[in-house]
Image (cartoon, rainbow, N blue to C red):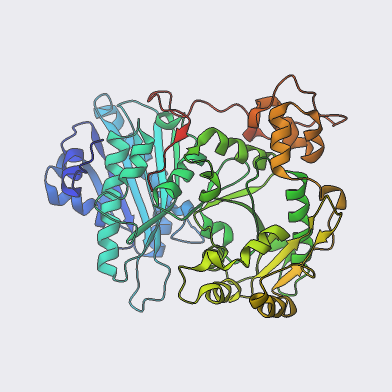
Amino acid sequence: MTSERPTTERKALAVNLDARRYGSFAEIGAGQEVVRWFFRVGGAAGTIAKSMSAYDMSVSDAIYGQCDRYVCRQRLQDMLDREHALNLERLRESRGDTTAFFAFADTVSARNFHGTNDCHGWMGIRFQAHPRDQDSQIILHVRMLDTENALQQEALGIVGVNLLYGAFFLNHEPDQLIESLLDNLSTRRIEIDMIEFSGIAFRHVDNRVMSLRLVQLGLSNAAMFSANGEVLQPSEVLYKKSILVERGSFRPLTNVNVDMLEAAKAKFQCEDDVDSSDVVTLAEITMRNLKANGDIDLRDFLERVDVLAAAGMTVLISDYFEYYRLAAYLARHTKKKIGITMGAASLIELFDDKYYTTLDGGILESFGRLFKNDLKLYVYPLLNRETGEMTTVDNLEVASELRTLYRYLVDKGCIEQLEDFDPDHLSTFSREVLRQIQAGDPSWVDHVPVEVAEVIQKRGFFGFRRASQSVANAPAKPLNPVVAPLAPLYPATGMTTSMTSVV
């Protein structure tokens, strides 16, 4: 693409003038803001087979089937399935040889009259890239950030046009497609916190990379996916859940990471207001960590994600380097308890005021934001291997002017020491494990979970030398399906496995 972005009018007209494209629009909430663009620019008769909106819940249920929530992924999928199937049923025989059919749908909750609702929506398109082609699909979740209903409707319409244009003209370049979604908009108006590609046109696309791309481009501050590689929408996963997070590089995932999370979870579940059946645990990697060596290396990113998947962990990629920003993000999705587990070394850094110079209130403001929703920090001890001493919450050294603040937070219960940990793991440091892997030192397998060692050995992750010894005395386990060899990310475009930051 050139640096000059086409206007929304030009995009809508380009779709209308493409004789192959013909389909339906179904929009619930915020008016028919997307299809309006195609009517407005002219030539819509050659593009629009049908336009409809079912605002009444009973009518919507009668058309698409009953659904617990009307602004959700399932309702969007029902809309896409039905409308695209109707197009094919009614029109495939008469014009299927020359027409690539599509169905566009959205279900949205724009700002209500009182301004009390969460302004967000689901949007998607199912389409044929070419006549008689198998179906492809893109779905995404948006948060509308404008404070006025009319502005939210306008932004929604522009995103919809961008999605249609991208699906038809940029489906062979998914990176550019994602980048184009906010053409003629800004991140101050729209956030896209989830996107999923599927179908024949996107058979080589790894949706985890696309999730990373959203955060890297600033379209969202966080993205989430499950252990099986499924892209998740954060608010649906975290809604009304107690949340426990471990931040790390996970390069690789070690026994310390697992022990820290298990010890914290055991303590977290003992809190009076935490239901153990409703706890969501997350392994978080920050963009700053991914860019520690400069540009983001996609191969390194996928290796980290795959070892986390082998351990069954849900992954959160975020641009929230400061813990108080992470806390605010999580609190946006739940009113229940939030816990963060970290090592004592990270707690020491947390009390370094050089990280808070951009805040008017400095470190006091940051801690006020961090702990305002009854958040708790669970601290894993740090072993000094030379002296054998452990740094814990009780003996941790902070600057003299912060000792009173630190003691206040400890006495209040905001910072708690983890007691139920395995002392055998305290001597493990991920950087040393990484060096052992790269040097062919077989002792590294003693410091990672068995399933993680299997994945690293089988797929040569983190510079593993295949001449190294295999996992000693480890029982054979079937690999998690997500660690099967990945198809090339973009074989048609010749893109490499490195991604240059454009933020």
Q: Is residue 357 left or right of residue 268?
A: left
User: Vertical placement of 187 versus 139: above or below?
Assistant: below
Question: Quarter-wise, where is residue 346 in the image?
Answer: bottom right
Is residue 389 in view from this perspective?
Answer: yes
Horizontal and vertical percent position of residue 95: 24, 28
Residue lying farthest to the left in this orientation: 42
Taking the spot 45% from the left edge, 68% from the top edge, the residue there is 358
The quadrant of the picture occupied by the N terminus is: top left
Out of 11 and 429, give the one closest to the viewer: 429
Q: Residue at x 41, y 56 (%)?
A: 62
In this rendering, the answer to whether 470 lies above or below 379 is above
* Front position in the image: 466 or 37: 466
Q: Nearer the viewer, residue 452 or 353?
A: 353
Q: Say whether residue 124 is left or right of residue 405.
A: left
Q: Residue furthest top?
A: 467
Residue 279, percent from left and from top: 68, 61
Question: Residue at 66% of width from left, 47% of height from top?
Answer: 313
| 58 in relation to 315, above or below | below
